[in-house]
Amino acid sequence: QERANLAARSPDNLRCPIVVIMGHVDTGKTKLLDKIRKTNVQEGEAGGITQQIGATFFEKKTLEAQTAKLNQTEQFDIKIPGMLVIDTPGHESFSNLRSRGSSLCDVAILVVDLMHGLEQQTIESLNMLRQKKVPFVVALNKVDRCYAWKTCKDTPIRDALKEQEAGTISEFRNRALDAKVQLQEQGVNSNLYWEMGDDDWSNSDFIPLVPTSAITGEGVQDVLMLLCQMAQRKIWKHIMWCANLEATVLEVKAIDGLGMTVDVLVVNGYLREGDKAVFCTLDGPIITEIRGLLTPPPSREMRVKSDYLHHKEVKGALGVKVIGNGLEKVMAGTPVMVVGPNDEEEDIKAEVMSDLTNLQSKLSTD
Ligand code: GDP
């Protein structure tokens, strides 16, 4: 079976890329996430967007619908099965982006306030993304604050720019140029994405800039489109689906009626009810049988236990709540593994703890 799984790895069988929104406080990360969730070609024709644990899932058909206008000219064929956008911009589990080689983030949106330019956390996020080699777009957000901006709700940014007066365009151009120069000072080459040349696109260090408004929605389609393109062109090898479990703990939470639960980002492979899962705690590894795998219901937010959907099996990439015994001391940001029929428990325990063990020995030598 293992061999069959490996054979299944192919550019035609991609998993959803995991998207993280990063940036300085107040640049509009939360608003942008809201807008991405709500922007739809036709009001009320939403669908295809589901709330998971810690993340929002966008089906392929939704991405297609949301980028349809842009796609009239771009002719880009979406092959990813969807996109998983992490719900908590700036969450501390993501301050590391990768855990034991597994992704917590495949592509990112770095949000910059067009009115303020680069700020301290922008630079920190920027450096982390570069260090972890995560491709990203820079959203130059709050473009609607340019003087006398005419709102063009939810349209591609170039269409919106065509509607603006010369004075507005000129302010926009100056501010965008400032951001570009500031990025250059950080050693990052960038340009408004539609002004990038073929050489720029093939240069993996070149960053596309997308003006956006998280309030009125201009440029949001462009961001989605670029994320799909980056996923398929730059990191397709990295997001090929495979059956081997790759999963990370996002958060450990007590839930009424359920006790202590662990929110897990399943990046690749399967997690099943009854699996013997191995988690990391400061006291060492623990093994527990998975008693439940839960996601929120398709509609509205859940408050009580009975509102969750129960799954026998989940497939990455997705966010899921795990119920089991003895989860109190599990640590966020650590990997989750499963003891298979041919595995030695002790090997898996050592592997789960290896990150932490390495970290501890590093700390003690520093
Ligand atoms: P976060 O701290 O990065 O998550 O930022 P928020 O999403 O909370 O936004 C910070 C403030 O900026 C809020 O008052 C938002 O309403 C405002 N804001 C965010 N995006 C935009 C935008 O595109 N245009 C305008 N005019 N205001 C925005």
Image (cartoon, helix red, strand yellow):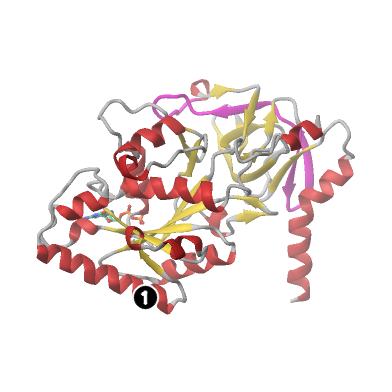
Q: In the figure, is residue 5 to the left or right of 220? A: right
Q: In the figure, is residue 215 to the left or right of 333? A: left
Q: Quadrant of ligand 1?
A: bottom left
Q: Position of residue 14 (x, y in %)?
A: 59, 38
> Which residue shows up at 90% across the image and 40% down it?
344
Q: Nearer the viewer, residue 6 or 315?
A: 6
Q: Quadrant of the N terminus?
A: top right
Does the stretch in magenta take in 155?
no
Q: Position of residue 23 (x, y in %)?
A: 41, 61
Q: Nearer the viewer, residue 253 or 268?
A: 268
Does the stretch in magenta take in 299?
yes
Badge 1 element: helix
Q: Nearer the viewer, residue 81 or 311?
A: 81
- Mark 1 = which residue? 182
Whether residue 148 is visible here, answered yes or no, is yes
Q: Quadrant of the C terminus?
A: bottom right
Q: Position of residue 132 (x, y in %)?
A: 59, 62
Please state which amino acid type lies under the numbered disc 1.
Gln
How dense is the environment of label 1, judged by Cα within 10 Å: few (below 14), some, or many (20 and up)? some
Q: Please give the range of residues in magenta.
A: 276-304
Whether residue 50 is visible here, answered yes or no, is no
Q: Position of residue 214 (x, y in %)?
A: 28, 50
> Which residue shows up at 16% across the image and 68% down it?
170
